[in-house]
Image: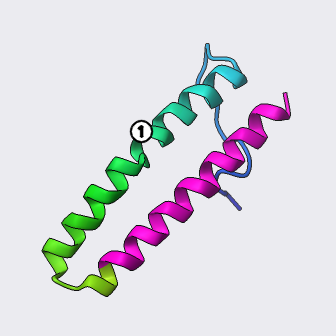
Amino acid sequence: MERYNFYELTHVPLGMKREEFIKTFRICVSETYSLKTIWIKALKTLLHTRNLEVAVAAMRLNFSYRMLSLHHIKRQLSQE
């Protein structure tokens, strides 16, 4: 069974060291799930759905995803 999550590294591009990949991936996740981006996504969700409950739920999920992913990336870096 294939798994793609933030718990373990599943792929390292050729010519790239494991730690280099993890650090680069962390930068991507940090930008994708920055606080500013999460708020903008929440506002867009509110505008499109016109439902505050849905927008708040989506925002909370994005905050949780951010915290979880950054935590597991940090764990990957400490395993080196």
| Residue at image point 22% right, 85% down | 51
**11 or 42, which is in the foreground?**
42
Residue to which mark 1 is pinned: 31
Viewed as shown, does residue 51 lie left or right of 36? left
| Residue at image point 38% right, 73% down | 58
Magenta stretch, overall SS: helix
Is 66 situated above or below 49?
Answer: above
Segment colored magenta: 55-80
- Please, which colouring scheme is shown? rainbow
Q: Position of residue 37 (x, y in %)?
A: 33, 50
Give the residue type at disc 1. Answer: Glu
Instruction: Answer whether residue 18 is visible to the viewer in this image.
Output: yes
| Residue at image point 14% right, 72% down | 47
Mark 1, secondary structure of its residue: helix
| Residue at image point 75% right, 32% down | 77
Viewed as shown, does residue 16 lie left or right of 56? right
